[in-house]
Image (cartoon, rainbow, N blue to C red):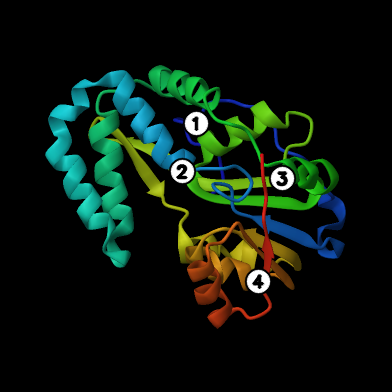
């Protein structure tokens, strides 16, 4: 599931980590949006593409339907697929790559603490995001070209019926891939309640910049959570 999709821009290779001694490595699992970097780059990219293309606004009923379907937990992939398909209909692979690169230059960058984490521990970090893998890798390559994480996993995009949509939507429980569950995870970090299953894999778990309500809900399931307040 983590092989490169034809729709993904080419960016520098990820960190090699300690591949020969993987069984001895204690890993770090990190979400990306609002965890390593502020804001939702997934939604931001969709809005950016829509502003640059304009005409998909004619498909606003389809986009709105996708938003409604997305609110049903069991149908999130269907909902996000409708939104992506409508906004990227007839967008060429070259156009897709150009828009991803251009959007990455509008992003505010990583949190200071995230820079430090990748600098010191990037060789044992897995970044696991619901955003398109191509988008996450492009942002990391722009911000930390010399300190890419050991592995980056995200939603994999493909073309279907003329538009892009995820063939694998890496959200919530779907982040718990077999290869992730077998790791000796020292630390897991995220901002989202959807990632509580992922946080539960870590011997230590950090909740990034939580609201009081989110913290209360998270600690009801994972009492050992630690709060981290990160800044740009």
Residue under the image location 76 percent in, 60 percent down: 27
Which residue does the numbered mark 1 point to in the structure image? 8
Distance of mark 1 from mark 3, alpha carbons? 24 Å
Which residue does the numbered mark 2 point to in the structure image? 156
Q: Mark 4 near mark 3, Cβ–Cβ under 8 Å?
A: no
Residue 130 locus on image (x, y percent): 48, 50
From the viewer's perspective, is residue 58 above or below residue 126? above
Which mark lies nearer to you, 1 or 3? Answer: 3
Residue under the image location 26 percent in, 52 percent down: 79
Q: Secondary structure at mark 3?
A: helix
Residue sitting nearer the eye, 188 or 9: 188
10 Å neighbourhood of mark 1: few (<14), some, or many (≥20)?
many
Which residue does the numbered mark 4 point to in the structure image? 201
* Quadrant in the picture for residue 144: top right
Which residue does the numbered mark 3 point to in the structure image? 114
Distance of mark 4 from mark 3, alpha carbons? 20 Å
Distance of mark 2 from mark 3, alpha carbons? 24 Å
- The residue furthest front is 212
């Amino acid at each position: 599931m983590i092989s490169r999709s034809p729709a993904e821009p080419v960016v520098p290779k990820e960190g090699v980590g300690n591949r020969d001694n993987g069984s001895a490595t204690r890993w770090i699992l990190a979400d990306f949006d609002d965890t390593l970097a502020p804001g939702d780059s997934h939604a931001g990219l969709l809005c950016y593409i829509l502003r640059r293309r304009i005409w998909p606004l004619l498909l606003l009923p389809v986009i709105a339907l996708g938003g409604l379907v997305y609110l049903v937990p069991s149908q999130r992939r269907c909902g996000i697929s409708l939104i992506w398909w409508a906004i990227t209909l007839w967008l060429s692979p070259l156009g897709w790559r150009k828009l991803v690169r251009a959007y990455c230059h509008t992003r505010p960058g990583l949190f200071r603490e995230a820079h430090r984490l990748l600098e010191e521990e990037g060789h044992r970090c897995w970044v696991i995001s619901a955003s398109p893998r191509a988008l996450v890798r492009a942002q990391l390559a722009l911000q930390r070209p010399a300190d890419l994480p050991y592995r980056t996993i995200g939603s994999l995009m493909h073309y279907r019926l003329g538009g892009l949509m995820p063939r694998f939507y890496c959200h919530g429980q779907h982040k718990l891939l077999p290869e992730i569950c077998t790791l000796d995870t020292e630390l897991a970090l995220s901002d989202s309640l959807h990632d509580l299953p992922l946080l539960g894999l870590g011997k230590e778990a950090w909740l990034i910049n939580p609201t009081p309500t989110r913290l209360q809900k998270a600690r009801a399931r994972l009492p050992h959570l630690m709060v981290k307040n990160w800044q740009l």
